[in-house]
Image (cartoon, coloured by chain):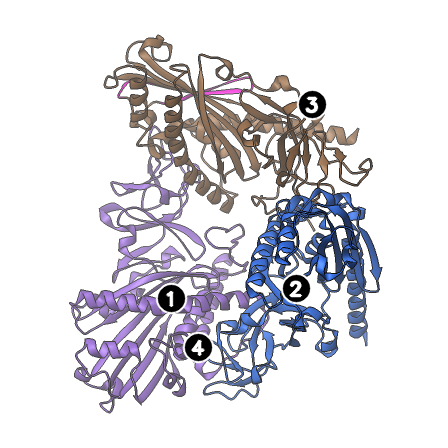
Chain colours: A brown, B purple, C blue
Amino acid sequence: MSSAGTRDPEESTVTLQAPFPKNTWYVACTPDEIEEKPLGRTICNEPIVFFRGDEGRVAAVEDFCPHRGAPLSLGFVRDGKLVCGYHGLEMGCDGKCASMPGQRVRGFPSIRAYPVEERHGFVWLWPGDPEKADPSLIPELLWANSPDWAYGGGLYHVRCEYRLMIDNLMDLTHETYVHASSIGQPEIEEAAPETSVNGEEVITSRHMENIPAPPFWQAALRGCGLADDVPVDRWQICRFTPPSHVHIDVGVAHAGHGGYDAPAEVKASSIVVDFITPETDTSIWYFWGMARNFKPEDSELTAKIREGQGKIFAEDLEMLEAQQRNLLRYPERQLLKLNIDGGGVQARRIIDRILTEEREDSQAGATV
Amino acid sequence: MSSAGTRDPEESTVTLQAPFPKNTWYVACTPDEIEEKPLGRTICNEPIVFFRGDEGRVAAVEDFCPHRGAPLSLGFVRDGKLVCGYHGLEMGCDGKCASMPGQRVRGFPSIRAYPVEERHGFVWLWPGDPEKADPSLIPELLWANSPDWAYGGGLYHVRCEYRLMIDNLMDLTHETYVHASSIGQPEIEEAAPETSVNGEEVITSRHMENIPAPPFWQAALRGCGLADDVPVDRWQICRFTPPSHVHIDVGVAHAGHGGYDAPAEVKASSIVVDFITPETDTSIWYFWGMARNFKPEDSELTAKIREGQGKIFAEDLEMLEAQQRNLLRYPERQLLKLNIDGGGVQARRIIDRILTEEREDSQAGATV
Amino acid sequence: MSSAGTRDPEESTVTLQAPFPKNTWYVACTPDEIEEKPLGRTICNEPIVFFRGDEGRVAAVEDFCPHRGAPLSLGFVRDGKLVCGYHGLEMGCDGKCASMPGQRVRGFPSIRAYPVEERHGFVWLWPGDPEKADPSLIPELLWANSPDWAYGGGLYHVRCEYRLMIDNLMDLTHETYVHASSIGQPEIEEAAPETSVNGEEVITSRHMENIPAPPFWQAALRGCGLADDVPVDRWQICRFTPPSHVHIDVGVAHAGHGGYDAPAEVKASSIVVDFITPETDTSIWYFWGMARNFKPEDSELTAKIREGQGKIFAEDLEMLEAQQRNLLRYPERQLLKLNIDGGGVQARRIIDRILTEEREDSQAGATV
């Protein structure tokens, strides 16, 4: 029998190689998700349990008790150990059994422990080779660690493969259609985007000059104490970095002051933050949010922006899931790669290169 | 045809040939379903989007945007073109890209356009070879175009293959059991049916004489201003025509006046209208209704009959879906073909003949 | 065994041999379930309909009408015959068509009839070779037929294979974790269990001395008019018999009076009754209940105990279903067999021996 019987939580398609990089850091969860109890979450097709272990440090091990196969995520944490909720086996953060009532556990089989780090307000997981896990590879996030910035965000589960979400975020033309009532406006599709590649970073920029501000940005201007009924210059600068992070500099400035480079007092801007983590080959955990450097102390504003962004980003989900089903139905069809798709196309090239490297590494390792 | 991976909206069984004729007209939807926005509907295993295109004429194309694979049915219609709701590609009624913001579309791949006609209050689709699509093959429906007739109906989605529904409608013996409280009565199964074949039409008739009227027909008699507590002669004349249309002349007359041939003033009668359209190999869109030539102007009566019929026809669904599951479970079992099954058996023979012709045509075409 | 197309009610894994004994009696239902109408229930991967046939005796036949494949369980019983709810075929308790309106049924194919017995307040089914079905093999159940005893119970559907439930019941260590608020207490896991095998019976016993009574047993002591705030001796004696019955002697006595052997006036005790019937390879019908020999006439107490037990036993379901999914995902992993698992391990050995015998019998039969 093959474990193509993986029906929980998502059916995945059969692939010879995982379609996502493994030797990299993914956002796995936020600290609040493991506050009360362990969190079971499948990442890169692997069921993992996250919990606070020794000294409150985050730990991640396979969600499988070596005693009878129960998911450890149904258990609880006691003294930094994860206690199985079925018969009480105590699992250590290293995947080794620490103890079990009435048993000697020395010979018990271990389960896999994953490199995991808590940083920037997120828990980061390294699903690949633990020996290669280098915390310094976790991206620097200025906005996450500065009192000048505020951040609010959320998490969506989406039944599409992670690259469809990267495409979505690297081509904001879709705002005109999917988000017509909030951030979309005809001027977006009239301004041709430019895509450039800088090492492993892909940048797609779009600048719109002397246009009306759409509703979302009118509200942001008002929030900054600026007139909302005057023409603005608007920008969207999408930055992809592997494996699947997209940050987007977005904003508007009163027209004629230099747009993106305008002085702070005539503009409203922020960073759209997107961490896309594969759950299975065809589903993702989508961590979205917005970081802003105005009124960072205003938590009501943070909540309000978060609510608005949550509604806007939810508009993408039906489209992405329906697109995924269509693509699974016609796997042989070649899609178009237009100039507006340049960001996604370049991002996929970088991902493919990484996947090739991982495959070669793994084959080299196998033949040594 | 391969329908592997067809998980939306129904899992279908693997077949070498589609089990339904393709070069024929099926009812696809009713005009109200495409009034506000495009309609995505799978027919004969193909996901199709229906919309009102140029000059308000009905159009049908593949539900797949050649840009990035999004379903076009999530978009909207503008100036007779179907606009993709993801990035704004404009699709023409012919399956060719008409335009896209900021793009030259001349070299874009086309998608399939389907022959489609609006007639008799329905939208008809030809899923097969477009060159053979002849609108004159759409059946004539007297009741649909005469002021002397009124029609009311509805649509059910049923998880059974289309031939099980044909069997159901060509053997009304089941009324005694499935519809015991409305149109069923023991006298039905006591009267042996007669089946005859006339070219591609199959007719199964049943005449019951001097019997009490069941509740549905008592109400109909009252609706016609006739006594409902006297013996009646009752008839059911089921008429199958390919691919899967069943019309049933039904009615009662006060006993002794000639039954089906009795004069209009002593009878209540109507036509049960059934268009059965395959969604997948094991599911259908079932368009049901009733046409009557008494009180055609009484729209309240139309609504009331429609409601009653809807309840009665819903009684079949559980049985048909459970029957389908049982048949899938025991595919090798031979079912009985009794005299009461004659209508369904003959209808299947005609369908099989058509399927053979289509296969031979397609092979001949392939070898030329 | 082929379970192709078995999508209702549970998908089952493909196995070469059914993983459960067939020549044995399983509890199929309780009499109240067939009081009003026939009951369709899949047992050992076979869809079966149970009904009261001739003279009110329980009957069981395949849930498949030989006419058109409809499930007979959607029909009704008339004069001891099961009438198909689609077209009225009358099925006898022997699986032979008794009659059908307007038809001669002599040549109709038969369906399978199953040996079935009503005894001890349950309906028992023999899914294997009918010639081997011996009602005297149905276990004796003293508590079911004595005025000194009262019984209350219920039925749960659980998506796990039947052996996981046997493991669960033969290792009550899990009470400490899964049922912490009712019957669990730390003292359970501190007392090592002892497992012994007596022919086809497996007995796992655990005795705890001079401990506080957990909430459930405090209530039971009060119910018996005994002090609930004094130390007790507690016992759990789990008895497995094939194919999958588990009875557990449970109770507490005021400490120092001999525990299990203490006189009736200082103890509260009962029998936990568990009949586990495979639905498919990975799902079960779980008949649970409790028999007690104190206050047997107090039906309010019976109802109260039943409600409490139902809540406690429901606590196991999430764990068992999650464990099953984990095991399907990692079929190659070897689980631990600790001393606390001894009861389940021995039970599985007996089951394996029976399965081997059945396979050899069946091969011997095939070659004769």
- Residue found at x 29% / y 18%: A222
Residue occupied by mark 2: C294
Q: Amino acid at mark 2?
A: Phe
Q: Which residues are magenta?
A: A192-212
Residue occupied by mark 3: A132
Q: Amino acid at mark 4?
A: Gln
| Mark 4, secondary structure of its residue | helix
Residue C64: in magenta span: no
Neighbours of disc 4 within 10 Å: few (<14), some (14-19), many (20+)? many
- Residue found at x 48% / y 77%: C76
Reply above or below: B167 against B283. below
Neighbours of disc 2 within 10 Å: few (<14), some (14-19), many (20+)? some
Q: CA distance from mark 4 to mark 1?
A: 26 Å
Q: Which mark is residue B346?
A: 4
Q: Chain of mark 1?
A: B
- Residue found at x 53% / y 36%: A284
Q: Main secondary structure of the magenta part?
A: strand
Q: CA distance from mark 1 to mark 3?
A: 61 Å
**Is any part of residue C352 visible from this angle?**
yes
Of residue C288 and residue A223, the one placed in the foreground of this image is C288
Q: Nearer the viewer, mark 1 or mark 3?
A: 1
Q: CA distance from mark 2 to mark 4?
A: 68 Å
Using the rendered view, name the quadrant where residue C244 is placed.
bottom right
Of residue B258 and residue A84, the one placed in the foreground of this image is A84
Q: Chain of mark 4?
A: B
